[in-house]
Amino acid sequence: MDLVRVAAVATGGVLGALTRFAISSAWSGSHWATWLINVTGCFLIGVLYTLIDRKIVRLFLGTGFLGGYTTFSTAAVDTLHAGLPYLAATLIGSLLAVWAGSSLTGIVAKRS
């Protein structure tokens, strides 16, 4: 086991989960806090995987931080309460966010 990689994922995961907790606490009582977290997380995943090639950075930010930040299990529970429109908004918003993050980052990277 590579302890550096494990530490990168664990540290990123803790920081991502704490960030998610802070946002959802500030906007408590709303299913849309989870939606915002997941969509912004997907956007950042698109940016990250387009921009960064270093494996340790991807492990820390992608698997760790963004893995701890996004929470699709909570979105599934929220769907039980908010219904199919919420599920559709989550799936469509998240997929569009990954595409937008990747596309915009590619455009900006070409100009640099």
Image: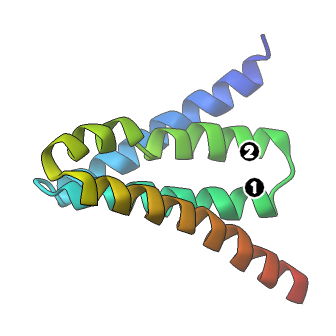
Q: Kindly identify which residue carries mark 2.
A: 58
| Residue for point 31% across, 39% down | 76
Q: Nearer the viewer, mark 2 or mark 1?
A: 1
Q: Is residue 52 left or right of residue 110?
A: left
Q: Residues within 10 Å of mark 2 (few under 14, many from 20)?
A: many
Q: Which mark is residue 107?
A: none
| Residue for point 74% across, 45% down | 58
**Taking 73 as reference, is 52 above or below it?**
below
Q: Where's the C terminus, which quadrant? A: bottom right
Q: Kindly identify which residue carries mark 1.
A: 49
Where in the figure is residue 1, as x and y percent of width and height?
Answer: 78, 10
Res 112 visible: no
Residues at circles 2 and 1 in contact by the CB criterion of under 8 Å: yes
Front residue of 28/86: it is 86
Res 27 visible: yes
**Taking 28 as reference, is 14 above or below it?**
above
Q: Secondary structure at mark 1?
A: helix
- Label total for image: 2
Residue most toward the bottom? Answer: 111
| Residue for point 66% across, 40% down | 60
Q: Amino acid at mark 2?
A: Arg
Q: Is residue 74 left or right of residue 52?
A: left
**Taking 36 as reference, is 70 above or below it?**
above
Where in the figure is residue 56, as x and y percent of width and height?
Answer: 79, 39
